Image: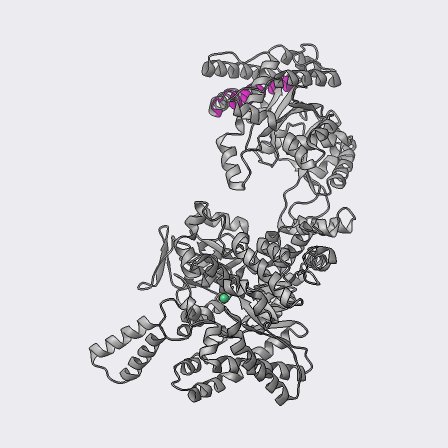
Amino acid sequence: MAKKWVYLFTEIEEVEKQVGGVWDAVRSLLGGKGANLFEMTRIGLPVPPGFTVTTEACNAYLAAGGKFPEGMWEQEVAAMKATEKVTGKGFGDPNNPLLVSCRSGSKESMPGMMDTVLNIGLNDITVERLAKLTDNPRFAWDAYRRLIEGFGKVVLDIPDTSFEHALHTLKDKVGAKMDFDLTPDQLQGLAAEYKAIVKKHKGFEFPQDPYEQLRLATEAVFRSWNGKRAVDYRKHEGIPDTLGTAVNIVTMVFGNMGSTSGTGVAFTRNPSTGEKAVYGEYLINAQGEDVVAGIRTPEKVARMAQDLPEAYAEFAKICQILENHYKNMQDVEFTVERGKLWMLQTRNGKRTAAAAIKIAVDMVNEGVITKKDAVLRVSPNDVDSLLHPQFDAAAKKVAAKEGKRLGVGVNASPGAAVGRAYFDADTCEEKAKEGPVIMVRQFTKPDDVHGMIAAKGILTSEGGATSHAAVVARQFGRPCVVGAASIKIDMESRSMTADGVTVKEGEWISVDGSTGEAFVGQIPTVAPKFEEQTDLLTLLDWADEIAAEPGSRQPGKSHSPSRGLQIWANADYPADARRARNFGAKGIGLTRTEHMFFEVERLPIVQRMILAKDSASRTAALDELLPYQRKDFDGLFEAMTGLPVIIRLIDPPLHEFMPDEEKLLEEVIEMRLKGETEGLAEKESLLADIRNLHESNPMMGMRGVRLSIMMPEIVEMQVRAIFEAACDVAQRGFDPHAEVMIPLTGTINELKWVQPRLERIAAAVQAEKGQKVDYKFGTMIEIPRAAVTAAEIATLAEFFSFGTNDLTQMTFGYSRDDAERNFLLKYVEEGILPFNPFQTIDREGVGRLMETCVEEGRKARPDLEVGICGEHGGDPSSIEWCHLIGNNYVSCSPFRVPVARLAAAQAAVKHWGK
Ligand code: PEP
Ligand code: MG
């Protein structure tokens, strides 16, 4: 049998047989619009009769360089004959003409990107007949001139302006304000003029044969798949070029046949709030394009209940049927022709984040969908956008129009921030006492953190998504844009320039961390509150339930944990821990203790400790630090009572705590030149000490556990502070669970050296305090060697936490500080890397190491707790990977916790029982 290229709307069963019954395949073959027209026909809704030419036909046509595949045209003609039969009209029949539209429609929605031709079947003869049959010559001539115009533009490529010019000239001449002020005679004249335009541009007459019109229109729709608009849109949206478009031939129904006719577009629920009420617009006595073109101001669709009560009642019923059928909010187009309702389109409606969440939760409560469906309905981005203040969209548009946009960089940490711009951390901290500030820097370093904490937002001209600024901003929930390269900061004049705009220090700027934009001036914001978002809270509770269900485990994997993937948070301060808990975190997965060392009153003690010439003076300095650390940990344990808190021992190389070498050198040179002697010797000695600490590659130098072995006194103090705090907190009636984490382990021998010493301190403190606390010792897995030798490492480590920032750095051999700045962007652009591996886990490389590590580690210690605390912990794809390899938890910045809760449940549902 010849291949079938054309299906009648009534032939859904045949289509399903052809593609194996899978709805996705039906959509691939018929396009989204076509598939839903078939489905609406199947469930008995009033769809005008018609048929669809498949996407396969389109692809075959394009592949053959513009030739219909064999048999297609004959099938199209046969389908037209069948349509004539059901409508009782004839295509080109002068007595009772059948008119059709020819509409594009690919699998993925590409609104307005491809072509459509209406009123096919009209010609010089049928138009006259239509005028008589409808007793409405105005309507008939208007339809005809619209066909010639649409056909001329879309099929024959005649510039729009030719037709528009003719229309305007006529309106001016007869003094008509609107199109509908034109009389039948004037419209008839216009049709003749349009035909003359066709002749002039193409050298042939406007085709009078309806089948010729249909053939050319079908070809035009096929061709529009490769039109520039469509190609650009697909590129932007990541829609494959191979899908092709279907062509839907639908019997025309007219909403412009008097006061019992009308047309409209509507959503079955409010797409902006999610409220359950039909929402949309309609126009009485009008054609669909009038609604879209805004020629007349449409009424609210609810108004139809008064104008056309019967049609409205049926419409409302159909909206409910469609929602129940598709189990989703629908976006529909309809027409009422002389009191009779026709459905022209339905599809899942686009919606705002707030609406997406409300609709998902409501539909579960209405019994339409399951909790698992609901969790899949909402995107992690939807959740994210509800947690951060957002700029008022209209105000932002105006600012952009007024040329106030300073530049666009990487959207490193979402949300909207408005404040006065300051260019260094100290000034930010100072000025923040007077009002909101935005910290603007080329890039940030650990000693900028106090300024970042004080700032409402952060903007840098360099750096990528895992630069220091980005990581810290996310951790503190500060909106942040990094790498806005158009911005040039001039510290001399204390101003910045971008795209011709100069901003002086202290001027207001606005930073949109959700989109990566920065503006001069104050853009108004709207701020949501997590606790008040009841629908979101409900959805996330369901997400937690789903992730914890036994079915979410990976069967056949002996290493899968006994409960589902949990979400923990990275937090250094009690306030962050409280926030994380409020967002639903079930533990703290990383406390970076060194951040605490940078605080103003502690840094000098830390420096003294580093520069100590002997163990005794080092211990003296550490004794001074101990109460500070104890207090830090005390607050964390209290905030997280009943839940685990992982505290990582000191990790960065020591030079990070010292004054800047270059700056100090300049000071020494200047003093020498000026002959100043007072304090010079101390400065020279300090300079020598800093130089002593210099390493050519500090990221791979004396940091992490290596530092603990070379200077054990520091971590000994830290462990004492941890256990003193835990015992104190327990004695106050709280329930601390301390997990001490050793960073950057590469071999079991490092743990063998350091861990027993620390365990002895833990035991000693508990004995001193007469208090037992729950605790664990474990390690970070950040070095490939540790991942590969996990079975050995797990003999001592009671938990693993993947530090995927370092693990990615070491596996690829890319410096995390340099890669994003220098070459990573190009690598992604050129397709050398599919994405930035510092944002999303590289499953084939880094991910494989993680998987092996979990398997090996749990062989040695079946109850080994495994988590991740690198920046990937907040990334949905990486969370999915952690689910697949059997992690116990992912830990991310507090503001990412809700997003991660959703992503964990989505991973569980997606791989349910697989
Ligand atoms: C990591 O390496 O992933 C990690 C969490 O540690 P840091 O970023 O502090 O090196
Ligand atoms: Mg690390």
> Which residue does the image show at 55% across and 38% down from the upper left?
239
Tally of marks: 0
413 or 792: nearer the eye?
Answer: 792
**Quarter of the figure with residue 520:** bottom left
Q: Is residue 189 left or right of residue 608?
A: right
Tell me if residue 148 is in the magenta stretch: yes
> Which residue does the image show at 40% across and 52% down from the upper left?
823
- In the rendering, at what x and y percent does residue 383 appear? 62, 55
Q: Is residue 195 visible?
A: yes
Tell me if residue 373 is in the magenta stretch: no
Q: Is residue 813 above or below residue 831?
A: below
Q: Is residue 330 left or right of residue 152?
A: right
Q: Is residue 388 visible?
A: no
Q: How is the image coloured?
A: one colour
- In the rendering, at what x and y percent does residue 230 appear? 52, 33
- In the rendering, at what x and y percent does residue 106 appear? 60, 32
- In the rendering, at what x and y percent does residue 150 appear? 55, 23
Quadrant location of the N terminus in the rendered image: top right
For the stretch drawn in magenta, what is the main secondary structure? helix
Q: Is residue 99 left or right of residue 216?
A: right
Stretch of the chain drawn in magenta: 137-160
